[in-house]
Image (cartoon, rainbow, N blue to C red):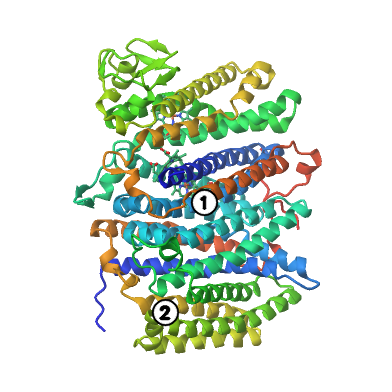
């Protein structure tokens, strides 16, 4: 395996692993806080039990997120010293701010987890809110750094080095808003659907279980609105990609020839020799409309880019189709839930609804991995779009296949353990005695 | 000596402060793992419990100091980050594996509370990783301090380019020194983590003899430095700063042992903090103005002034949010003696 490929694979494995935990770190605190607030308002012990179990799950996942994130921040230097030396002055800013967000998050998570009987209930709830806010902030800052890699601004290149650096302009790059919005919504949608889906699955066998019913309702409250908004936010992203990274858009759509009234290509497989997409459904004018909101607009194709600089079209195209497909399904399920709730129906009465939710449980996470594949693979061969090539940024160290395989094994091992622990500790329905053994905060809430 | 500090100097000092905080707080957490590994005698399980209660709520916050140091390095001194990533690729990667295993094994052990063989296995991984990681951190520091982390030559054998810079007697000596330092630090801190007199005595004994080990390790490192790391050796022994530094550090070290002897644990805690910080700053000052001798200076490696200024502003804002939060964290968990600290399930 060539060293560049090993380095890219190691980075991809590390990020793909880390992002799962990062997403949970953004989404789960919101669920905990909602459950705790409900318990405070209604005195419902099931909600307290949920808040505690979720907190426990979050603690496990947060720790793995923290260590895998640490690996990532070192890997930026271990694998891409050329990139960091070049880009550090411009994008150090969001990373520094991210550092503070982690700090706040870690502090308040410690207080939240271990402080149940040490601080007042109100302070405890606020600690949870702080965890949720700083979790979202850390995600936003790091995605801003990534958006800069896609649409770099705030510097000039003079003789191969950055000059006239303006870190604020770098943070306000033209992809930043779209990507951070899309990623934050993705975190809520993925976490909410995963939790709701797991409990829906368990409810199918045990329809009246109060624990699973409450869990499902709270998770949908967070996940469903995000899932409905996600296609709209995705449309914003797609238009920004069309404007700033035409090669990536062309790869996403496997759109080879520049032209007007370009059809939207759904599914199919790009044939790179023939430069056409086989077995696809085409909607006339669809891509022109989506990219520029005009059926007759011109959309640049891959023919505008030298062949050697094409990203891997089949991967990008397939990943994009996967994300959009899953996103559409999730949005439909969310709308269904909204309809049922609007009509004041019992969500858990409909077997088909529960089945659809259970099916959707992993979809948010798969869509996130697919979306990042689109973003990162679609940017190749550039590490900073149009400015610095990935091949120029990689470390001179040979033998990179060794750390790649090592970290991959380590991550597989951790992944299996985490799944098993979550099952053993969190998901399994509690025995009634487990949640009547009360371990309430220092002061009891007023009865509702 | 006239003090005309530049912006870059200030940021380098803040970087050193972040490292200092990491060594003090994160170092103690690693040391706790070492004592978990070395827990012996009839009170073995209780010792482990005290350690895990002491680390539980704070290790993640302590760990972030390392992240802060990393982030400051690549924002403010990008060539330094790039150089470290290339020259120290191997020990840094191994250290990362240690960090991953330590953190996740500790968490798995805490939350997988079934008291079975699985949980004990996590305990062993946690403790083993706590032993190895500080040594690797020390090896990296040793390589930089010895001035061996210069530019990697374009040609030569793999061993010459990527192994020789850090696999030296001096680096290994610094690795062992770091381990002894963290273990000593943790033992001193742990005397305050329980009000069971037997526990306190256990940790006092450990603090005393790890203090002895620390003296041996420090002396050993100094001897090796004279032959293997002339740059640092002379910095530590000859520069005008060096004598007062050695004297004060020695005083602090003796104060720690004396305070332990007379069971003045709060005093011991302060003194050991001072001692550890002085060792770190002694290293920093001895290689000033170099960040990575022999070629990368603070001024030479610094990012453009705008970046430095903005990072400084961000740090200022961050401090406003962070300091009160940190104080709150430690007040909630470290003010009362730990017998009342409860796990997340509240059982005890
Ligand atoms: C729950 C997850 C999820 C769902 C349901 C969707 N996405 Fe997405 N998408 C992501 C999760 C995601 C992501 C993983 O979060 C990405 C990667 C980079 C980013 O900013 O968000 C992403 C990237 C991404 C990009 C590329 C941005 C770039 O390269 O800079 C586009 C164009 C879209 N998405 C469009 C859509 C559309 C039209 C969807 C319609 C249903 C959609 N996404 C659903
Ligand atoms: C190059 C990419 C990335 C780097 C270098 C990186 C770095 C880090 C680091 C150093 C940590 C650990 C901080 C701690 O100790 O608590 C961390 C955790 C975290 N990261 Fe990342 N990260 C990257 C990508 C992302 C992305 C894209 C997101 C989100 C959208 C994200 C969200 C988070 C969150 C929320 C945490 C907190 C841990 C948790 O809750 O699980 N990270 N990251
Ligand atoms: C956390 C979510 C993310 C995921 C899942 C992800 C995914 C990926 C993937 C799949 C690659 C390999 C691309 C290829 O092989 O062509 C990659 C590369 C890379 N990513 Fe991301 N990415 C994420 C976020 C980020 C962020 C926020 C940064 C910020 C700096 C970043 C920096 C990099 C770098 C430096 C590389 C290596 C160079 C490259 O191939 O472009 N990534 N990432």
Q: Position of residue A84 (x, y in %)?
A: 34, 52
Disc 1: which chain?
A: A
Quadrant (top left/top right/bottom left/bottom right) for the C terminus of chain B? bottom right
**Total numbered badges shown on the rendered structure:** 2
Q: Does residue A54 appear to the left or right of B93 in the view shown? A: right
For this orientation, the residue located farthest to the top is A284
As drawn, B137 above or below B115: below
Q: Does residue A327 appear to the left or right of B115 in the view shown? A: left
Do the numbered discs 1 and 2 sit on residues whose CB atoms are within 8 Å?
Answer: no
Residue at the spot x=72%, y=70% of the render? B39
Quadrant (top left/top right/bottom left/bottom right) for the N terminus of chain B? bottom left
Q: Secondary structure at mark 2?
A: loop
| Front in this rendered view, residue B138 or A67 | B138
Measure how far apart labels 1 and 2 are at the Cα level: 31 Å
Q: Does residue B263 appear to the left or right of A6 in the view shown? A: right
Q: In front: mark 1 or mark 2? A: 1
Q: Is mark 1 within 8 Å of ligand 3?
A: no
Q: Position of residue A157 (x, y in %)?
A: 21, 48
Provide the residue designation for mark 1.
A402
Q: Secondary structure at mark 1?
A: helix
Disc 2: which chain?
A: B
Residue at the spot x=70%, y=60% of the render? B124
How many C-alpha atoms fall within 10 Å of the one at disc 1: few (<14), some, or many (≥20)? few
Provide the residue designation for mark 2.
B229
How many C-alpha atoms fall within 10 Å of the one at disc 2: few (<14), some, or many (≥20)? many
| Residue A440 makes an appearance in the image | yes
Q: Which mark is residue B188?
A: none
Q: Position of residue A436 (x, y in %)?
A: 78, 43
């Amino acid at each position: 395996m060539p060293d560049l490929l090993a380095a890219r694979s190691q980075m991809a494995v590390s990020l793909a692993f880390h992002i799962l935990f990062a997403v949970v770190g953004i989404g789960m605190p919101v669920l905990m806080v909602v459950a705790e607030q409900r318990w405070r308002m209604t005195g419902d012990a099931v909600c307290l039990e949920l808040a505690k179990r979720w907190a426990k799950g979050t603690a496990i996942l947060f720790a793995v997120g923290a260590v895998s994130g640490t690996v990532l921040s070192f890997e930026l230097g271990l694998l891409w010293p050329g990139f960091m030396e070049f880009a550090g002055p411009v994008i150090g800013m969001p990373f520094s701010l991210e550092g503070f967000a982690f700090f706040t998050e870690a502090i308040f998570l410690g207080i939240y987890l271990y402080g149940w009987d040490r601080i007042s209930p109100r302070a405890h709830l606020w600690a949870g809110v702080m965890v949720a806010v700083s979790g979202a902030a850390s995600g936003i800052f790091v995605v801003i750094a990534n958006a800069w890699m896609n649409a770099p601004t705030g510097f000039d290149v003079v003789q191969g080095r950055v000059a006239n650096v303006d870190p604020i302009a770098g943070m306000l790059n033209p992809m930043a808003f779209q990507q951070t919005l899309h990623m934050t919504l993705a975190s809520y949608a993925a976490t909410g659907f995963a939790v709701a889906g797991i409990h829906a699955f368990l409810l199918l066998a045990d329809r009246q279980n109060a624990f699973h019913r409450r869990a499902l309702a709270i998770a949908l409250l967070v996940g469903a609105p995000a899932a409905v908004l996600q296609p709209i936010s995705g449309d914003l992203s797609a238009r920004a990609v069309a404007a700033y990274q035409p090669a990536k858009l062309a790869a996403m759509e496997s759109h080879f020839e520049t032209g007007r009234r370009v059809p939207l290509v759904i599914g199919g497989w790009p044939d790179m020799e023939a430069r056409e997409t086989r077995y696809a459904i085409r909607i006339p004018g669809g891509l022109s409309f989506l990219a520029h909101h005009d059926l007759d607009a011109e959309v640049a194709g891959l023919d505008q880019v030298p062949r050697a600089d094409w990203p891997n079209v089949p991967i990008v195209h397939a990943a994009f189709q996967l994300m959009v497909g899953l996103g559409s399904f999730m949005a439909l399920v969310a709308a269904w839930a909204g309809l049922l709730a609007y009509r004041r129906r019992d969500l858990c009465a409909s077997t088909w609804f529960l089945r659809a939710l259970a099916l959707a449980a992993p979809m948010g996470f798969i869509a996130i991995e697919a979306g990042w594949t689109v973003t990162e693979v679609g940017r190749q061969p550039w590490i900073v779009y149009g400015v610095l090539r990935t091949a120029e940024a990689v470390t001179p160290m040979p033998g990179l296949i060794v750390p790649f395989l090592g970290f991959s094994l380590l991550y597989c091992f951790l992944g299996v353990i985490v799944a098993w622990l979550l099952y053993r500790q969190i998901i399994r329905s509690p025995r009634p005695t487990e949640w009547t053994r009360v371990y309430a905060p220092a002061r009891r809430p007023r009865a509702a | 000596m006239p003090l005309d500090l530049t912006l870059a100097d200030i940021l380098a000092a803040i970087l050193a402060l972040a490292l200092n905080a990491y060594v003090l707080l994160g170092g103690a957490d690693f040391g706790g793992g070492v004592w978990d590994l070395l827990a012996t005698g009839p009170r073995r399980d209780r010792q482990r419990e005290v350690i895990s209660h002491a680390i539980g709520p704070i290790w993640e916050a302590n760990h972030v100091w390392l992240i802060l140091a990393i982030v400051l390095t690549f924002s403010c001194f990008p060539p330094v980050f790039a150089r470290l990533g290339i020259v120290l690729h191997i020990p840094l990667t191994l250290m990362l594996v240690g960090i991953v295993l330590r953190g996740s094994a500790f968490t798995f052990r805490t939350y997988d509370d079934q008291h079975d063989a699985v949980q004990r296995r996590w305990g062993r991984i946690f403790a083993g990783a706590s032993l190895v990681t500080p040594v690797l951190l020390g090896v990296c520091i040793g390589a930089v301090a010895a001035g061996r982390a210069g530019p990697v030559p374009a040609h030569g054998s793999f061993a010459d380019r990527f192994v020789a810079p850090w696999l030296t007697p001096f680096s290994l000596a610094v690795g062992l020194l770091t381990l002894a330092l963290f273990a000593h630090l943790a033992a001193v801190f742990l005397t305050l983590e329980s009000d069971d007199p037997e526990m306190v005595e256990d940790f006092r004994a450990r603090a005393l003899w790890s203090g002895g080990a620390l003296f041996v390790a420090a002396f050993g490192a100094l001897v090796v430095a004279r032959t293997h790391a002339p740059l640092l050796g002379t910095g530590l022994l000859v520069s005008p700063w060096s004598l007062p530094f050695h004297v004060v550090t020695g005083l602090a070290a003796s104060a720690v042992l004396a305070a332990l002897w007379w069971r003045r644990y709060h005093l011991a805690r302060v003194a050991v903090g001072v001692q550890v910080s002085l060792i770190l700053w002694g290293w920093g000052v001895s290689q000033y103005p170099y960040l990575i001798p022999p070629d990368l200076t603070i001024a030479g490696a610094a990012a453009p002034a705008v970046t430095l200024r903005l990072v400084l502003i961000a740090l200022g804002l961050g401090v406003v949010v962070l300091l009160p939060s940190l104080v709150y964290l430690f007040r909630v968990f470290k003010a009362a003696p730990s017998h009342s600290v409860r796990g997340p399930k509240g059982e005890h």
